[in-house]
Structures are given as structure tokens and as C-alpha cells.
Amino acid sequence: MFADYHVHTEFSDDSVYPMEDVVRDAIDMGMEEICFTDHVDYGVKVDWDCGEEIAYRCGEPMANVDYPRYAAKIGRLREQYGGQITLRMGMEFGVQMHTIPRFEALYGRYPFDFIILSVHQVEDKEFWNGDFQAGRSQQEYNERYYEEMLGLVSSFHDYSVLGHMDLIARYDEAGVYPFEKIRPYAEKILRKVVEDGKGIEVNTSYHRYGLGDSTPSKDILRLYRDLGGRIVTIGSDSHKREHLGAYVREAKELLRSLGFEEFCTFEQMKPMFHKL
């Protein structure tokens, strides 16, 4: 099974990759299944139809998915290309504790196949521009990040997998923060993930970011395995053609080397297991 379960299109504020081009490219690559997971980040972005002024970043509007158009386009593409590839409707929810009610309401409005729960910002402060880290020591911003994540998995349940669990490492200019220092948080988080029948993803974008470890780290993947975790998806976190499907095969090899035997795709929020 060749599948990519973290795919962004023009419906994400940080991508201009047309959804139909994604489908055609995936077919050309021999993919059997993809899941669209465009961004929703309440707290730092607004909905298209909110009536508020929309901010711009790098010339692109900072807004959440246009939900009705998104669902309708996926439906049309399923009709057009369904004989060649399986298309799943997902989203990447960038949740914060104070935005949980809005995500719960959104989840109830559409028939999702798959939801990635990601922590993209805390206290409405972004990681990518350093706002969240500013004024905090490396220990403080790492611990605050994982505290937020623990609160989320304890309070929010409308998701399938925890996305790029150690994302903060991508933006940590102080260097690698030792795993043993975050292990107590990671263990509590992953115990709850396993207890609730949820999963985690291997996000292959670490290759293009030049990181020295996988995302999440091998230590986190081993801990998840040791705690009984079985639900793992693989996604490229693609935003353009050259990202799509990248390093998926290498991710399977990594998982096998760590003792995993299966990976998952999803249908109607239920995991489907495939041999690695």
C-alpha cells in the first residue's frame, strides 16, 4: 500500500498546490490512497466567512479551510478519479486548549475520514517565527509545549493521530533538547493516546528540513511502541509536488527497524491496518 496521509492543497493558507493536481500527481506516482489534511488553526486564523478582515502572510491569506468548497471538491474528485485512487477527507486541526469548542463544533459538521491533531501554536503564539519561544528558556518552552499537548489529548477526542509530535524541535534554535528531559511528558501523553485508541504519525518532512532525527524522534516512536501503540500513519506533510509521497518508503523501513509490523490508513475515522 502506497499512501500519503498528510497532504496540503490550495485550501491551506501555506500552499497553492491545486487539489486536482495533487490527485493527478499521486496517480502518476502510483499511489493507491491519499488523505487531504488542510489546515485549520483557530486562535491565529479566521474562517473565510467570518466577516472579519483577513491578514496576509507572504502574499497568501491567513485563513482556515473554506469548508463547504473543500468538501464539495473532494466529492467531485472522488467521482472523477475514484477508479484510479482512493481519496479520503481529513483535516489538520491545530488545536489549543482555548479553541477546543470550535474544533468540536467543526468536527460535527462534516463526515471526516481522518483528523490530525497538531500543536502549531500555544497561547496564540507561533513557533515558526519564534514568538512562542521568545522570553522563555529552552526548558521552559519545551515543557510548556508538552504541557499543552497533554492537556489536549486529555480533553479533546475528535482526532485520529497526533501529528509531528515533537514539532517544537524543528524550531528550536538552542539545539537538540534531551529526550530524557521531556520523557515524563511524552509518556503521559502517549499513555493517553494509546488508552483512547488513537495513534501518531511519522511525518517525513524531517528529511527536507535537514533534521538529525525522525519526526517524531526514534525515542518517541520506541516509547509509543513499548506502551502498546499500534496505530501509525505516514505522511509527507506535502505543500507542493516535490513533497508529495516523499520518503514514505523510507518511513516504512524505519518503522520496521523499530519493531512495528503495520501502518494505518483511515476510513470514517476507523483505522485500517496494512503490513509494512
Image (tube, grey):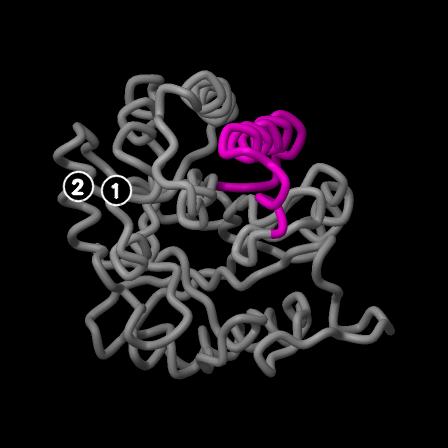
Q: Nearer the viewer, residue 14 or 275?
A: 14
The answer to whether residue 270 is above or below residue 178 is: below
User: Which amino acid, by three-letter code, is at mark 2?
Assistant: Leu
Q: Nearer the viewer, residue 118 or 77?
A: 118
**Quadrant location of the N terminus?**
bottom left
Would residue 195 be found to the left or right of residue 243 on screen?
right
Q: Are there few (<14), some (14-19), or many (20+) residues within 10 Å of tag 2?
A: some
Q: Residue furthest right?
A: 51
Secondary structure beneath label 1? loop
**Quadrant location of the C terminus?**
top left
Q: Which mark is residue 213?
A: 1
Taking the magenta stretch, the answer to whether it contains residue 20 is no
Q: Position of residue 241 (x, y in %)?
A: 32, 77
Magenta stretch prevailing secondary structure: helix
Mark 1–mark 2 CB contact (< 8 Å) = no
Q: Position of residue 131 (x, y in %)?
A: 62, 51
- Say which label, 1 or 2, has the lower sequence index: 1
The answer to whether residue 88 is above or below residue 148 is: below
Q: Which mark is residue 242?
A: none
Residue at image coords 28%, 28%: 219
Would residue 42 be found to the left or right of residue 23 on screen?
right
Residue at image coords 30%, 31%: 221
Secondary structure beneath label 2? helix
Measured in 3D between alpha carbons, the distance from the residue under mark 1 to the one under mark 2, in whole angstroms, is 11 Å
Q: Nearer the viewer, residue 112 or 189?
A: 189
Q: Which residues are magenta?
A: 131-160
User: Which amino acid, by three-letter code, is at mark 1?
Assistant: Asp
- For label 2, the residue is 254
Q: Position of residue 182 (x, y in %)?
A: 44, 24
The answer to whether residue 201 is above or below residue 157 is: below
Residue at image coords 56%, 52%: 130
